[in-house]
């Protein structure tokens, strides 16, 4: 029996300031401590990009391309993502938009696929033999991979509360376009109030997976 591949998780958020850097490190450590059977990648751990002590001028002038190549490639291959898209974290907001775009594309292609399958069903709604070619198989595999990607987001701000506020008296409000993208791109259509809310969700999911075997 072929060994099942370990799921990949992308852990993203602001890493520019010392406080943010420490927060990302803490999140990474919490995942390791939670003992979830998942391969965690966090840009904060990628010293080839973030360790500026030994970087050359030439490498620094091509840092943007290097960051995009490393992070987007891992973002694409991940089965799970956990992002903290604070409005100060421009890169993470871009990643959230990328996830939304990929999911939007997948939903559109899945709709096309479902409509196509209808043409190969009999009056009892039984699917008739379909002549697939190699391209169709590869296309479908890629569509389902994107469609089933499980994305989660969290955003902590001390000013957040549940009181009724209006006009300029609002303590805090996230950009609504960003919020809409988060709701559309996440697996549970939720922006969690803290990172700690997500760990139990993933633990429960992997517990259910274990019970399937």
Image: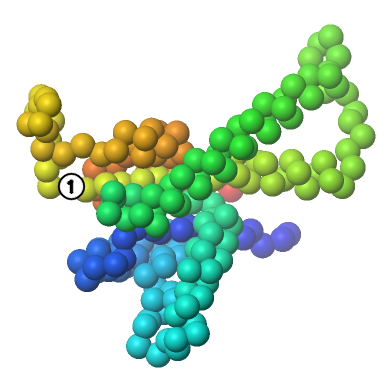
**Image quarter for residue 133?**
top right
Residue in front for this viewpoint, 182 or 194 = 182
Towards the viewer: 75 or 55: 55
Q: Position of residue 179 (x, y in %)?
A: 34, 36
Residue at x 41% of width, y 65% of height: 42
- Identify the residue at image location x=54%, y=52%: 79
Please give left or right for residue 41 compared with residue 157 in the image.
right
Front-lying residue, 154 or 89 = 89
Horizontal relation, residue 18 to residue 2: left or right: left
Residue 212 found in image quarter: top right
Image position, residue 161 (x, y; %): 12, 35
Question: What residue appears at the point 64 percent right and 30 percent down from the top-left corner?
Answer: 108
Q: Residue at x 11, y 25 (%)?
A: 166
Number of other residues with Cα within 10 Å of mark 1, as a class: few under 14, some 14 to 19, many 20 or more: few
Left or right: 12 in relation to 108: left
Up-down: is 50 above or below 213?
below
Residue 17 appearing in the image: yes
Q: Secondary structure at mark 1?
A: loop
Which quarter of the figure is the N terminus placed in? bottom right
- Would you say residue 190 is visible in this rendering? no
Residue of label 1: 157
Left or right relative to 50: residue 130? right
């Amino acid at each position: 029996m072929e060994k099942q591949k370990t799921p990949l998780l992308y852990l993203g958020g602001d890493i520019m300031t010392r406080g943010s850097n420490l927060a990302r490190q803490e999140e990474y450590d919490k995942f390791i401590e939670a003992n979830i059977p998942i391969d965690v990648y966090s840009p904060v751990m990628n010293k080839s990009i973030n360790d500026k002590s030994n970087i050359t001028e030439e490498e620094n002038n091509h840092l943007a391309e290097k960051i995009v190549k490393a992070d987007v490639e891992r973002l694409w291959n991940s089965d799970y993502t956990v992002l903290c898209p604070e409005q100060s974290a421009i890169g993470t907001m871009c990643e959230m938009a990328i996830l939304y775009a990929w999911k939007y594309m997948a939903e559109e292609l899945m709709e096309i696929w479902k409509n196509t399958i209808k043409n190969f069903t009999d009056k009892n709604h039984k699917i008739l033999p379909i002549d697939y070619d190699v391209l169709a198989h590869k296309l479908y595999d890629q569509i389902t991979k994107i469609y089933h990607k499980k994305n989660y987001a969290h955003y902590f701000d001390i000013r957040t509360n549940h009181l009724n506020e209006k006009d300029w008296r609002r303590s805090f409000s996230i950009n609504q376009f960003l919020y809409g993208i988060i709701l559309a791109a996440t697996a549970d259509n939720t922006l969690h109030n803290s990172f700690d809310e997500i760990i139990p969700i993933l633990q429960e999911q992997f517990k259910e997976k274990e019970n399937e075997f």
